Amino acid sequence: MSGRALPAELAAVRALVADGLAEMGEVGDAGQVWIRSASARLTALDGVLTEAAGVLAAPVQVAAVTMATFLVVAGSAALAGALGFSGGGVLAFTGAAVLIMFAALPYAGRRVFGLVGRRRLARSAAVPAHRSARPAPPGPAIVRHPEAALAQASDRLLRARVRLVSAALRRAGADDWTTPGLRRAIRTDPVIRRLAHADQLLCQAVDCLERHLGDQRKDAV
């Protein structure tokens, strides 16, 4: 899958999830434990999808880390010299600065991926793929039964999962459409790793809605 196609697919997934959340909001029972759990997972899902859309190419990441390491080494060595450290002190000070930098890299990387992902998704979501570009004419408000709204929300989330899994499989490539191949892809590809996490969150959200609907049916008997 090309670098531009993935953000478009993820933007469509996010739009379907947003529609599902809107359907859940119609229920007016957000304090219920299963609905609250589903909402929390969908909120986390949005952040994971944003990061997946913003993952930079490996050469760009290597170049950025190399440049950052050079700047940290040069800056810390200059600072250590200005503080009057000797050769061994400069080396220790520089080494500590580099260790701190590498410890902060995961957090910094997530922040960068999130910023880049939001920009890419914003460009791709100008006209969501699953919606009509022409807005529907206004009409009378339709009041639905809460179970119908939640069932519709679950359906939208399942449609979002179909698109998400399809995007992940295309990203992995047909040669890796096996259990060992997909496991290897999850380990080695940060995008697929995030898509797998997003799929897990989406499945959990759907399960929470189904459990809530099941409890409602039991109470109605």
Image (tube, rainbow, N blue to C red):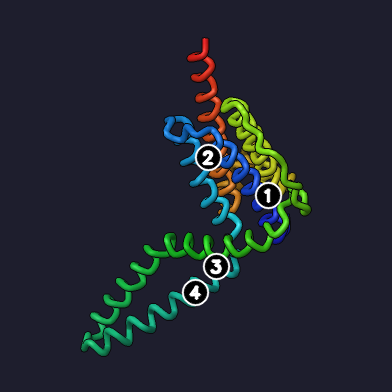
- Earlier sequence position, callout 3 versus callout 1: 1
For the point 59% across and 53% down, the residue is 191
The numbered disc on residue 201 is: 2
Q: How many numbered circles are shown?
A: 4
Q: CA distance from mark 3 to mark 4?
A: 8 Å
The reply to whether discs 2 and 4 touch (Cβ–Cβ < 8 Å) is no
Q: Is residue 29 above or below residue 4?
A: above
Q: Residues within 10 Å of mark 4 (few under 14, many from 20)?
A: few
Q: Residues within 10 Å of mark 2 (few under 14, many from 20)?
A: many
Q: Residues within 10 Å of mark 3 (few under 14, many from 20)?
A: few
- Earlier sequence position, callout 2 versus callout 3: 3
Give the amino acid at mark 2. Answer: Leu
The residue labelled by disc 3 is 61
| Tag nearer the camera, 1 or 2 | 1
| Tag nearer the camera, 3 or 4 | 3
Q: Position of residue 188 (x, y in %)?
A: 57, 52
Q: Position of residue 96 (x, y in %)?
A: 30, 71
The residue labelled by disc 1 is 12
| Quadrant that contains the N terminus | bottom right
Please say whether residue 176 is visible from this viewpoint: no
Give the amino acid at mark 4. Answer: Thr
